[in-house]
Image: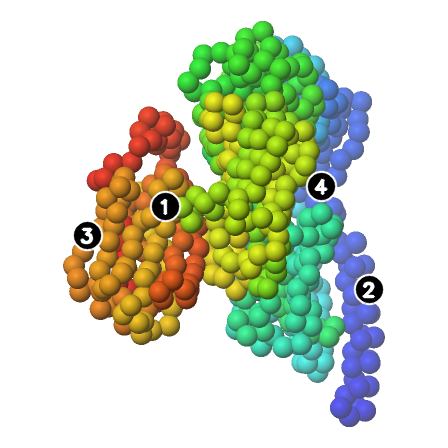
Amino acid sequence: MSRSVLGWMSSSGFLLRVLETQFHQISSDSFLSLSSVSQHASGLQVEVFEGAESVQLPCQVKVSESDGSTAVWDQDDLRIPTVHVRQPDGDYLKDQNRRYEGRTAMMEDALRTGDLSLTLRRPSFTDSGTFTCTVRRLGEELHQEAVELQVKEAPAPVWPWVLVVLVVLVVLVVLYHRLKKKPTAAVLPSETVEIREGLKSVLLPVKTQKRLHNVRVEWIRSDQNIRIHVFENGQTRSELPEDNRVRTKMRPNLQESGDLSLTLRTPQLNDSGVYDCVVYRGGEKLLQKAVTLRVKESLMEEVEVADREEFVLLPFRTAADLPAESKVVWSRTDQHNSVHEYQNSQNQSDRQNQEYLNRTQMNPDALRTGDLTLTLNCPRLEDSAIFICTVYNDQDGRILKRKVLMLHVKVHQVEKVSVEEGRRSVVLPFKVASPLLAEASAVEWSLSDRGNKLVYRCYRGQDSSAQDHEGHTMNEDLMRTGDFSLMINNVCLTNSVFSCCVYNEDRKILRQKVVVLILRGFQSEVVKVTDGDPSVSLPFKIPAPLDEDIRVEWTRPDSKQTEVITFKNGEIHSPKQVLGYRYHGDTEMDKDLLTSGDLSLVLQRPRPKDNGLYRCTVYSGEEVQHMKMVTLSVGEPLDGSFTDRLLCCKKRKTSRDPTPENVQLVFNSSMNQD
């Protein structure tokens, strides 16, 4: 750049400052403020020029007066004086004067904060007059305040001076940016994501086609000014406090994919806010996008727990804006008496069902915090039901909040234990709560996928290992501590499914747990599907072609009758003794299966009773060649109404036994391509 240009820029900068000074002087001499507020003996006076976008009529009261009350703005000079009405549940504009229709607004939290100021849009001469703000509760007038509004004619504009100054400023700014040639960051269109509380995770989407080598990516919670996740030098890390760091995740290969999306696990109500994704290279900002997350209250949720656990939480968290006199009632749809009642910061047990006496509790500060979660101690199988939490306004009985939860109390638990190949020992964990120990008489560990072969048995006061599994050990004081974990020693570990049953003296199963032992490198997958879908595929593909003498078995290791379907000697067999399963097809599938290597299993019309573990094993003789475990999860339809989902749950409870007509299992030989 030549010295003359630099000199010109320097003098232009001086000229710019001079023009700015002159502009501010002109503005101060020629323009009055758009609105002003002054105090008079008769009350507040607000002045505004006609043509202003809006004007605010101030009114501040004590929170003790506004909380739970009704605020009314009137102009007594009008035949219909009502200007704006705010009630505890929102605006009430039915009686509003038509001249103010669509022109008035109050802050959303006005009654909670005591700031009852009214915003009037597009004020005109005819709006001049006295406005009155009145606060009433149950017919009693708690506060009244008058505000006089004067709408004046705007002063004559000084457009010639303004136009000259603006033209000069625009020319200088454009010339300055052209000479500097400083790149600006690309701002992607903002996006809003809305979900219901209770989901396992939510994705905040950001994708770009830009080259992202040697960049730093920051995710910032801009409404709280905190950084929550960073990508730098090919690695991602969470910036949340240590106990919450597992909640955020980014893709590690974003340089190639351009996918900067952030996964937030277990989203909660307080996660609602604005999240900014900002991309830097060096100190230069390359890209920015804002994603607004709105987490709404979960209207329906399912909770699973094992029988006789120490306790289970029925979660219900809502906004902390409930009136102090509200009444909270937890109930079951199949019982008349309540499960739990809460009012006046105390648990009410007068109308409580005797089955839940001394077994339920709530936070004493529930209404102030908005946490209405119910703690149910020592859940039992008969506690499986549909629970409804309803919050009533004790004064008029109106329903303020409501949530539905389905509690499933199951006998068995399922857990995966992963170990490295070559290990010779491993602990299979199983702990139970103390209320179960008084009834426990015997504990048995067995291999579910090998004909329920006994591994270890312990009676109260004595224990013994199976002959071919000597060296396995359990806690010596297990009947007192409830730690029924099994240590497998001195064996060559293989992929297996173990089952542990706790019996009482009558050999009734009190608790059961399935532990899937998986060697690292072993294939495992979770497949999710919605109840009512026509079919679901449990995928399993291996290198092809396959030997003709192989045997393929699909089994249910967590079921009493494990075998589902088998391929052997070129034929597919489905055992008749497996109630509810059948195979239909033709023999042309045999050749496709061997040539494609696609061993996927198709389940027709999946239902919630099909949830569980499915295992596919490929044998050559008696040697295992390949193996895969698939966990199937059949969920409720997301778009179903409350009534549909409740009826679906009740229907499942009354018809637990499967019928041969509603389930079909077939090998997927026709899906040769992904």
- Image quarter of residue 549: bottom left
Residue at the (61%, 58%) spot, across then down: 424
Q: Earlier in the sequence, mark 3 or mark 2?
A: 2
Residue type at the position of mark 2: Thr
Say which mark, if any, is on residue 562: 1
- Neighbourhood count class around disc 4 (C-alpha, 10 Å): few under 14, some 14–19, many 20 upward: some
Label 3, label 2: how many angstroms apart (C-alpha)?
88 Å
Q: Residue furthest top?
A: 350
Which residue is the site of mark 2?
A: 21
Q: Is 198 placed left or right of 336 in the picture?
A: right
Q: Which of the two discs, 3 and 2, sits closer to the camera?
A: 3
How far separated are the C-alphas under marks 2 and 4? 24 Å
Q: Is 483 in front, or is 669?
A: 483
Q: Position of residue 41 (x, y in %)?
A: 80, 22
Give yes or no for contact between labels 3 and 2 (Cβ–Cβ under 8 Å): no
Q: Position of residue 541 (x, y in %)?
A: 37, 66
Q: Which residue is mark 4?
A: 35
Mark nearest the camera among 3 and 4 is 3
Q: Secondary structure at mark 4?
A: strand
Please determine whether, in this image, residue 73 is positioned above or below residue 25. Answer: above
Left or right? Give the position of 509 relative to 595: right
- Above or below residue 100? Residue 578 is below
- Color encoding of the figure: rainbow
Position of 265 relative to 672 (above/below): above
Q: Is residue 197 rendered to the left or right of residue 141?
A: left
The correct choice, above or below, for 370 with respect to 227 in the image is above
The answer to whether residue 175 of the structure is visible from this angle is: no
Query: Which one is earlier in the sequence, the residue at label 2 or at label 4?
Result: 2
Q: Secondary structure at mark 3?
A: loop
- Mark 3–mark 4 Cα distance, whole angstroms, equals 81 Å
